Image (spheres, helix red, strand yellow):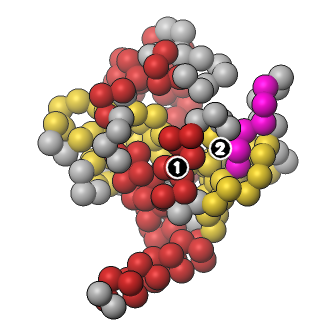
Amino acid sequence: MQFIASERLIMRPVRADDATCLFRIYGDPATNTFNPAGPYPDIAFAKTRLAQWLQGWQQHGFGQMAIYDRLQPQAVIGFGGISLRPLADAMTWNLGYRFATEAWGKGLATEFCQRMLDYAFDEQQLKKVTAIVRPEHLVSQRVLLKAGLALRGQIADIANVTPSLFYVLKSEEWHRQRQDMVRRHISR
């Protein structure tokens, strides 16, 4: 796979030369306001994380992606994707993303999530996608709901902190939502 596009975004698989951009976004304290682990401490940490993401691509054929604004394709504005992650006692396909602060407030996260879910269910034939968000991160909770995921409970995924919120969307739910959207559009 080379690229995935939406109305305003272009996404491509991460590459080894993305470490500087990854550190710029994930090392920014503002993008980690709700992350108990805090920002990436240095470029070496970003390179290690990037190597893990690249390994995920080799193992599964999809994973984390670099995100660009179609109007400014020279600069990475975020990273995200669907990757295999342990959750409680099972492995799950988890949707995650992080955008640079200059991309906030434009609906890009919702657009990204919707396109990734299309990709997950229509092109990769996944049966279920999960997402985890901190309970105080209200903006991300709204993004997940707009994208079609449903809150299913809490999960103690990080030691010694309040449990995270656990969202799920199953393939059959996604297809039913898409059919409902088409019916509403046709009936106008």
95 sits to left or right of 100: right
Residue 44 pos. (x, y %): 50, 11
- Residue 126 placement: quadrant: bottom right
- Residue 94's place in the image compared with 127, above or below, is above
- Residue 45's place in the image compared with 57, above or below, is above
Q: Is residue 63 visible?
A: no
Front tag of 2 and 1: 1
**Residue depicted at x 45% and y 77%:** 178
Q: Which residue is mark 2?
A: 132
Disc 1 crowd, CA 10 A, few/some/many (<14, 14-19, 20+): few
41 sits to left or right of 93: left
Q: Residue furthest bottom?
A: 187
Q: What is the span of residues highlighted in magenta in the rendered image? A: 161-166
**Residue depicted at x 48% and y 59%:** 147
Q: Which residue is mark 1?
A: 142
Residue 25 pos. (x, y %): 41, 23
Mark 2 element type = strand
